[in-house]
Amino acid sequence: MKKYELKNDFKGMKKGTRFYVIAESEFIGVKEFVLRTQDFLHRITVTEGELMNNFISVDYFRQ
């Protein structure tokens, strides 16, 4: 499962919040990703550009 962490505050979420990618879709060249917080309480949908600009990929979640 792909894991990401916020680089800066975004859509009401604080910098450092960790997410799992739970779904990816592409329609007419536009990619969208559905992300869930590590505790699965919050869900956001972002485009590929938003994902690249506001998130960093992490290999593991620090406890």
Image: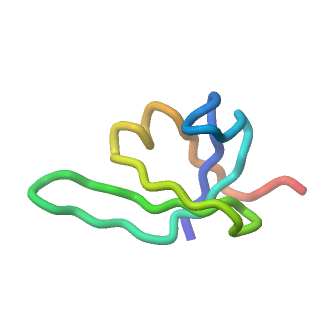
* Residue 23 locus on image (x, y percent): 42, 70
Q: Which coloring applies here?
A: rainbow
Depth order, front residue of 11/58: 11
**Quarter of the image that includes the N terminus:** bottom right
Quadrant that contains the C terminus: bottom right
Image coordinates of residue 37 in percent, x first then y, are: 67, 59
Please determine whether, in this image, residue 60 is positioned above or below residue 16: below
Residue found at x 63% / y 38%: 12
Q: Is residue 3 left or right of residue 53?
A: right
> Would residue 38 be found to the left or right of residue 33 on screen?
right
**Quarter-of-image position of residue 2:** bottom right
Q: Nearer the viewer, residue 9 or 7?
A: 9
Residue plotted at (66% across, 41% down)? 13
How many numbered tags mark residues here? 0
Q: Is residue 40 left or right of residue 2?
A: right
Q: What residue is shown at x 60% (from left), y 63% (from top)?
A: 36
